[in-house]
Amino acid sequence: MAKIISSMTGFGNQDAEVKDIGRISIELRCINHKFLETVFHLPEGLLSLEDKFKKEIEAKIKRGRIFCAVNIRSIDAQGIFINRKLLKNYLQELRELKHEFKFAGELSLDALIRLPGILSLKENKPSGAHIWESLRPLFLQALASLVQARDKEGRALARVLKARSQLLKKDIIFIKQRFNLAVRLKLKVIKADDERSAFLKSAEIAEEIDRLNFHIINFVQKISQGGPVGKELDFITQEMQREANTLAAKAFDLVISGRAVEMKSQIEKIREQVQNIE
C-alpha cells in the first residue's frame, strides 16, 4: 500500500459499556505542533497509565499536540460510608456544650447524619492496575479513528498541494517563454555591445528558474513519498519562496514581475497548508 501524508489535525473517540467497570468514554483530539506532545485528562485512579497511553500514541503518531480525555461512569457507585470517628468527636463536643450551657433536649439520629462529613456515598474508583486490559482495546480503537481522520485530511491536502504545484510549473513555463520574448524586444533597442552584454548578465534568470523548478519537483516527490515529511516540505517551500523573491527582484519585464508576485502568493498558500502536515 502506497504511503500517504497525514494531517496533524483530527478527532477520534470510543464509547462502550464494560462489564464490572461501567461505561468508558475516550476522546482524542489533535492539533498542529512542532513536535509530539500529549496532554491527558484522566480519572484519579488512572494517572499511573499515562506512560502506557503515551507509548501507544508514539507508535502511531510522530507529530502534533494530542489531548486525551478518559471518563468512566462506574456501575458500582453505591454503598454508604459513616465516619464513626468523626461522629464520636461530634458527640463528645456536643455533650460538653450541653453540660456547659445547660442545653435541654437530645440530638436525633436525623440531625446527627446531617452533620458535615458524617455520611457519604462509597464510590468504587477505577484502578489502573486492573483496568488496563479492558481499557487498552477501547483506547486503540479511539486512536485508530484519530489516525484515520488525520490520514483522510492528509490525502485531501496532498491533492491540493499537488494541484498548486502544477500551477507553479505552468508559471515557470510562461516565464521562460515571456523572458525569451522580452529579451529579444529589449535587445532591439540597445545598440552598444557592452550595454547589451551588461543587460544580458543582469537580466539572466535561468539559475533561479532551474532552482525553483527543482524545488517544485522535489516537493511533489516528498508528498508522494508519504510519511512524516511536514518539516521537509516546510523547508522546501522556504527555498521556493526565496527563489521566487529573487526572480521578482531581477525581472526587468513587468509581465514577468507580475507573474513572479503571483507565484510568491501561491507559494505562501502552499506553505500555510504545509503547516498542517505531520
Image (tube, rainbow, N blue to C red):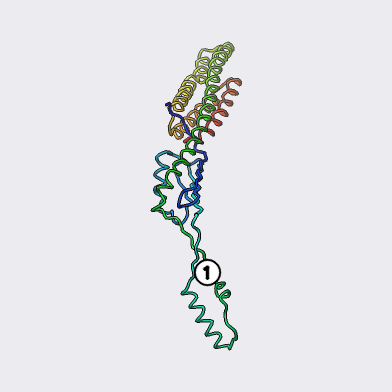
Q: Is residue 126 above or below residue 228?
A: below
Disc 1: CA contacts within 10 A as few (<14), some (14-19) or many (>=20): some
Q: Amino acid at mark 1?
A: Leu
Q: How many marks?
A: 1
Which quarter of the rendering shows the N terminus?
Answer: top left
Residue 97 sits in which quadrant?
Answer: bottom right
Horizontal and vertical percent position of residue 84: 47, 73
Left or right for 252, reference 238: right
Q: Depth check: 270 or 226 in front? A: 226
Horizontal and vertical percent position of residue 207: 46, 21
Horizontal and vertical percent position of residue 213: 48, 22
Left or right for 40, reference 265: left
Q: Which residue is mark 1?
A: 119
Horizontal and vertical percent position of residue 18: 47, 48
Q: Depth check: 133 or 148 in front? A: 133
Q: Is residue 12 above or below residue 199?
A: below
Q: Depth check: 146 or 214 in front? A: 146
Q: Is residue 205 above or below residue 12?
A: above
Q: Secondary structure at mark 1?
A: strand
Q: Depth check: 154 or 276 in front? A: 154
